Image (spheres, rainbow, N blue to C red):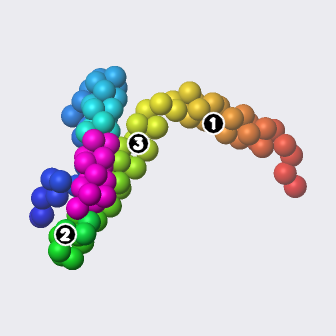
Amino acid sequence: MRNYSSGYTVQIDSTDKQEHRIRLITQLENCTNHIRSLQERLRSDITKLKPIELERLLDDYRAEQIRYDNLSRELDGHNTAAKTAAAKERWRKQNRDRRKKLHY
């Protein structure tokens, strides 16, 4: 099996939600800094780069953007617990109401 260590992986060794949330925030900040450095490099050195180097740099930039999106989605999942609980309660109420109706 291949090892994709530079890609996006979910780490579930954390037992504490707050600790996991802090880790996500740290990873998101690191990702943001890396995206900024790639943007600066693209803006300043674009005419000096060889086509293969430019392509590699654009691939790195796109991969980092995907990583950022995945991390932000996972972090949003930790921030929206109240919305999830409200949605579950709404579904339970709808199911109770449906059971009460007479079906012919």
CB within 8 Å, label 2 to label 3: no
Based on the picture, tell me whether residue 49 belongs to the magenta stretch: no
Above or below, comparing residue 74 to residue 54 in the picture: above
Q: Look at discs 2 and 1 and give the one toward the viewer.
A: 2
Q: Position of residue 82 (x, y in %)?
A: 56, 27
Q: Please state the extent of the stretch shown in magenta in the rendering.
A: 32-45
The amino acid pointed to by label 1 is Ala
Q: In which quadrant is the C terminus drawn?
A: bottom right
Quarter of the image that includes the N terminus: bottom left
Numbered badge on residue 72 = 3
Which residue is denoted by mark 2 in the rendering? 49
* Disc ID at residue 87: 1
Q: Residues within 10 Å of mark 2 (few under 14, many from 20)?
A: few
Q: Is residue 42 magenta?
A: yes
Question: Magenta segment, principal secondary structure?
Answer: helix
First along the sequence among labels 2 and 1:
2
Q: Secondary structure at mark 1?
A: helix
Label located before the other in sequence (2 or 3): 2
- Please state which amino acid type lies under the numbered disc 2: Leu
Q: Secondary structure at mark 2?
A: loop
